[in-house]
Image (cartoon, grey):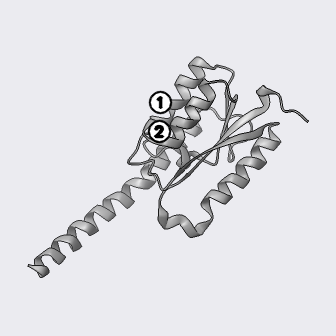
Amino acid sequence: MTISKSNKGIGYIRRSSHKQLDNHSIEIQKREIEIKAKAEGYEIIHWCIDDAVSAYRKTAMDRPGMRELFMYIINNEADAVFFYEESRIDRTFNSFVTQIYNPIKSLKPNCKFFCTTVPGEWDAHNTITEMKLLFAGQESIPRQVTNRTLNLLYGQKTEKLNH
């Protein structure tokens, strides 16, 4: 069976850090994306993976996998994007929407976006989606502040002990 171009999708996966190597994050995301793609009538023809890449420290276009996804869609390789959930695409609240989603929708208005946690097509401008993106960004702030604080406290303390 040949899949028509309109039924080809790109899967995007992101694992935050090497600390997550043993938690099967990539495999879980891949499995859920494949299930969603099949339910929507698509075949994933290519995987774009950002492994050990922060979506808090790097905007969407600063991540190699996301740039690859953008080029696949722009070059007419596929007409749909599939991802696991909002925290996998962005932790800055709006870089995915402003750098990837809006430009693709402007150039390729028929391109569809799908999230495994949302029934049907994903809409970046839906109020609930915007809240999920906001929460995804907020989840990273306490972790970053805590890590920075601990480094400052223990780093300075260790330095003083060593000198």
For residue 112, side relative to residue 130 (left or right): right
For residue 163, side relative to residue 74 (left or right): left
Q: Give the residue type at disc 2.
A: Ala
Q: From the viewer's side, name the closer residue of 86 and 61.
A: 61
Q: Quadrant of the C terminus?
A: bottom left
Q: Is residue 103 above or below residue 144?
A: above
- Locate residue 155, reporting x and y percent: 21, 71
Q: Which residue is mark 1?
A: 99
Disc number placed over residue 108 in the picture, else none: none
Query: For the point 63% across and 64% down, which residue is it?
Result: 24
- Locate residue 45, reporting x and y percent: 73, 39
Classify residue 158 by image quadrant.
bottom left
Q: Are dots 1 and 2 in contact, CB under 8 Å?
A: yes
- Locate residue 162, reporting x and y percent: 13, 80
Q: Which residue of the protein is positioned furthest toward the bottom in this rendering?
A: 161
Q: Is residue 3 above or below residue 140?
A: above
Q: Which residue is mark 2?
A: 60
